Image: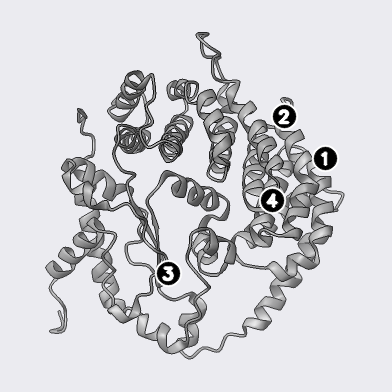
Amino acid sequence: MPSTERPLSIFIFSAASWLQSPQSAPLLPASALVFSSQRGARSSAKADSGSSEDEAASEARSTTSECPSLLSATAEDSLGGDVVDEQGQQEDLEEKLKEYVDCLTDKSAKTRQGALESLRLALASRLLPDFLLERRLTLADALEKCLKKGKGEEQALAAAVLGLLCVQLGPGPKGEELFHSLQPLLVSVLSDSTASPAARLHCASALGLGCYVAAADIQDLVSCLACLESVFSRSCGVGGSSVPVVPASLHGLLCAALQAWALLLTICPSTHISHILDRQLPQLPQLLSSESVNLRIAAGETIALLFELARDLEEDFIYEDMEALCSALRTLATDSNKYRAKADRRRQRSTFRAVLHFVEGGECEEETVRFGVEALYMDSWARHRIYAAFKEVLGSGMHHHLQNNELLRDIFGLGPVLVLDATTLKACKIPRFEKHLYNAAAFKARTKARSRVRDKRADIL
């Protein structure tokens, strides 16, 4: 072992400290870190008073990158001396995208589906506003035909591409025009009980995301909320009636409609929130008994969001049936039924511990997402829902859009896009050996944190 090797214990201590506190930075020079996002008003210091199990669960749920790559592949290559013709790559990409757009009108359904999937991947991973602005009308016409005449997978892909188009074009006249032109078709497919569940699922997500980004009229917001609410409300019993049995094939649709509805609640005026609380807060707990773990989790997170919005309106908000709700949440937070998959049990218990803590009057657990040399802090259920909605459509391209997409930077308060020169990027680069040791230490610290809550049936008092 070379004499320059650093003791592994130092890295374990640093990694464990960094995982426990989102205020701490990775093992980088202080001058190399740029935090564009401002921390929320809530402090995470109160978490210290909780049980060690809750702290460990929080660590296990953290979305903080263990050792984020500070350089894109292109930047690293250029620093290494390789000259990359970015303009040539952009031209090649645009040529391929033109071919995909042309294939959207092909007679073969398989060809159209392939073109839609390629467009979806390209729009999720790259920022192409100028290219899309020039062809927005062509794309709108092609997507309209796919939604009208397509079946199943083609409709689902067309809806997914539409949501990405709204993210790329952002708010403003062009994005609003695109959303208004295709909104009736999304509503039509979503409301059609004979349509493919996958197509309806993606239409629900696209309707929520498109309305969140592009709709400027309050009436559009209200109509989208009503449409999405009508989808998942059918699975809730009215009054004292029993809960209807929902086929397993529709669980994904109900989950997508509920999450899209919750996304729109984050921008809903307070005058409408009070009516929604009176109507839905007594009904949503019924979804906690669903057979689908995803639907149960979506319902729990939405209930927490409703409580957050209610407390914003009235600080001393009191829910009438609080005891029954907390009992249901506590049951899910300590569920150990063996017929559920182990991963599902862990995820469910982790989520509902946080939901129960918040509903009973605690703070929302803070999570940190690091991308490049920046960090995004999420300290509210509304912020969690917004991030999750964009992460679902952008996938692995989320960090790229957080760095370069003005829409996302405005939504999360990250400020203008950072322009870093080669000298700054080179200063931020972590030596390979140090990165390896850091990853090993972070992995060991994370494993210890998770082992404290693995397969333990803790009662929450």
Given the image, on which type of amino acid does mark 4 rest? Ala
Q: In the image, residue 183 lies at what x, y percent?
A: 75, 43
* Residue, disc 1: 148
Do labels 3 and 4 touch, CB within 8 Å? no
Do labels 2 and 1 touch, CB within 8 Å? no
- Numbered mark located on residue 191 in the image: 2
Comes first in the chain, label 2 or label 1: 1
Residue nearest the observer in this picture, 230 or 424: 230
Viewer-nearest of labels 3 and 1?
3
What residue is shown at x 51% (from left), y 69% (from top)?
Answer: 403
Q: Secondary structure at mark 4?
A: loop
Q: Residues within 10 Å of mark 3 (few under 14, many from 20)?
A: some
Viewer-nearest of labels 4 and 1?
4
Is residue 93 left or right of 64 when viewed as pictured? right
* Residue, disc 4: 216
Q: Secondary structure at mark 2?
A: helix
* Residue, disc 3: 36
Do labels 3 and 1 touch, CB within 8 Å? no
Q: CA distance from mark 3 to mark 4?
A: 27 Å
Given the image, on which type of amino acid does mark 2 rest? Ser
Viewer-nearest of labels 3 and 4?
4
Is residue 53 left or right of 373 when viewed as pictured? left
Comes first in the chain, label 3 or label 1: 3
Comes first in the chain, label 3 or label 4: 3
Residue nearest the observer in this picture, 256 or 8: 256
Given the image, on which type of amino acid does mark 3 rest? Ser
Q: How many marks?
A: 4
Quadrant for residue 204, please give it: top right
Comes first in the chain, label 4 or label 1: 1
